[in-house]
Image: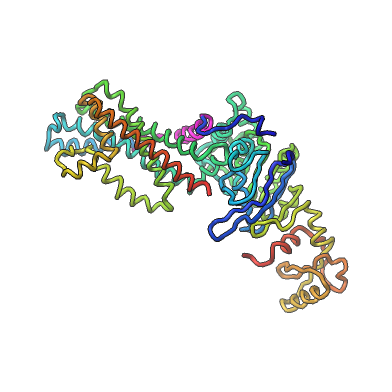
Amino acid sequence: MEEDLAIRLRGAVKRYGEITAVDGLDLDVPMGTCVGLLGPNGAGKSTTMRLLTAQSIADEGEIEVLGFKLPRESKMARAQCGVVPQLDNLDTTLTVEQNLLVFSHLYRIPRSERKAAIERSLEMAKLVDRRDSRVDKLSGGMRRRLLISRALVHRPRLVLLDEPTVGLDPQVRQELWALIDALRSEGTTILMSTHYIEEAQRLADTVMIMSHGSAVASGAPADLVLEHAGHEVVEVYGAPARLREVEAEADAAGLRTRRTGTSVSILDAANGRGFHGERRPANLEDVFVLLTGEEIA
Amino acid sequence: MAATETPRIGRLERTALTGVLVREVVNYSSYWKSSTFSSTVEPTIYLLAFGFGFGSLVSTIGGVDYVSFVGTGTVATAVLFSSAFPGMFGTFVKYQFQRTYDAILAAPVDTEELVTAEAVWIATRAGVYGCVPMLVAIPFGLDPAWGMLAVPFIAWIAGFGWACFGISIAGFSKSFENFNYVVSAVLTPLFLLAGSFFPLDEFPQWAQVLAQLNPLHHLVQLIRDSVIYGWDGWIDVARLGAITFFGLSMWRIAIVAMTRKLVD
């Protein structure tokens, strides 16, 4: 057993009737790193998150969290984990402080440390002067900050973030990224699922791209880009018919392409001299679309 | 490594139960007024309506004032209303709409602890609210008795069972609409076949036999024996055993139901 792994999945399978949500997934999250699970909707990210808190029980495979074997020892793992769910489940008729108080009990913080823990969470969420506000009076961004700091009230060693910024406007997202980045720099281990490419690129040390329940690529964002999309991409614009021609030409030249809405991007285009278009640096989105497919399931 | 350092975490831990209870108590501080209002006003209305309505036709029943008969009988009604309904609707709302249980189960709390703590909380409320009809009946003519002190405890045991019954229904139901079937086909008949408002002596034999299977009926008899008639030896021990058995069975069923619902 590798002791420096916060999370270790081997061949995890989770089926719901006919659907296999997680299909033989291997995942390593080393201590002190931030790993991003990147994938389109329905790739199995949320199910993976539920497996880690034993709210879903795997049909096959091994799962270890902080050295505890799941599902049997899950409760011990959960005591040292913080979980930020995708859907807000704060108690909306309670105040900010009451929400934190409840979780300080649920996470077994000793009485003598409870007050300090709540203060620390309030500061982290920048809600010190809103402590007595009812949650249903807070803005969307404040609620998210509270949701995150609630999960950190007991200083967990591992934090699971399920789509932490989904549905929020850009300003709020920046703010939350700063919060998550601060956590990362303190050495907390983070597993974060997201379908926002920029989020994974900015925050994750390692990204694992998931598709149809299993990993299709894994590595540091920059390495993944280099490996799958090269340094540069040429984007060719034109009418749909022209775009199909470009795709055929690139294919004939042994180059990979992906649609970029109104254009075709020719990947790893250092040797694609014959194509005229806008040159731009390759990015993680190119890799994402290339590996998870262009069609939306 | 960590497995040997951390103390083993067991089942039904006090800290986990406390955590869930703290959440309920803190939440209660935001809705206790409406909850207390409905739990107090409802049995009072029953008491007044039946007391004055029937009371004008029959002055005594089973050797006591009709008000005393109904005042003790509606204790069971109050217990049922303040436990089965929160068990059903409260659980469903917390599971389906507020997703509270997702948050709690992500913490070091198991479904067994969650269900137990929720039922303990509802039972405690039912134990208190169950006394209201009895207290309201005192100024209308119910004689105070030492046996009244046993009522909250008996109501607690029954409330625990009905809370677990409600939680089980919520756990097995796929939608809110199914609750209508349970209320109409199960709770209403049991409520009327409990002997709260009229004695069951005149019922056909088969109905009297069925009443022996109704935990609510045993609750009504236990309360009346405690407050009015005095305890009836082994018969009341058996009745207490029946509602305790009901509570323990429903408790295990509720845990199974909610585990199926919450853990997939």
Q: Per the image, is A187 magenta?
A: no
Tell me where residue B140 appears, x and y as whole percent. 20, 28
Tell me where residue A147 appears, x and y as whole percent. 60, 42
Mainly helix, strand or loop, the magenta region?
A: helix
| Res. A125 visible in picture | no
The relative height of residue B233 versus residue A246 in the rendered view (above or below) is above
Q: Per the image, is B31 magenta?
A: yes
In this view of the protein, which residue sits in the foreground, B10 or A117? Answer: B10
Q: Is residue A69 left or right of residue B35?
A: right
In this view of the protein, which residue sits in the foreground, B1 or A274? Answer: B1
Q: Quadrant of the N terminus of chain B?
A: top right
Q: Quadrant of residue A267?
A: bottom right
Q: Quadrant of residue A15?
A: bottom right
Q: Is residue B196 left or right of residue B107?
A: left
Q: Residue furthest top?
A: B146
Residue drawn at 74 percent across, 41 percent down: A2
| Res. B70 visible in picture | yes
Q: Is residue A232 left or right of residue A163?
A: right
Tell me where residue B53 appears, x and y as whole percent. 16, 39
Q: Which residues are magenta?
A: B14-38
Q: Quadrant of residue A6?
A: top right
Tell me where residue A64 appears, x and y as whole percent. 66, 43
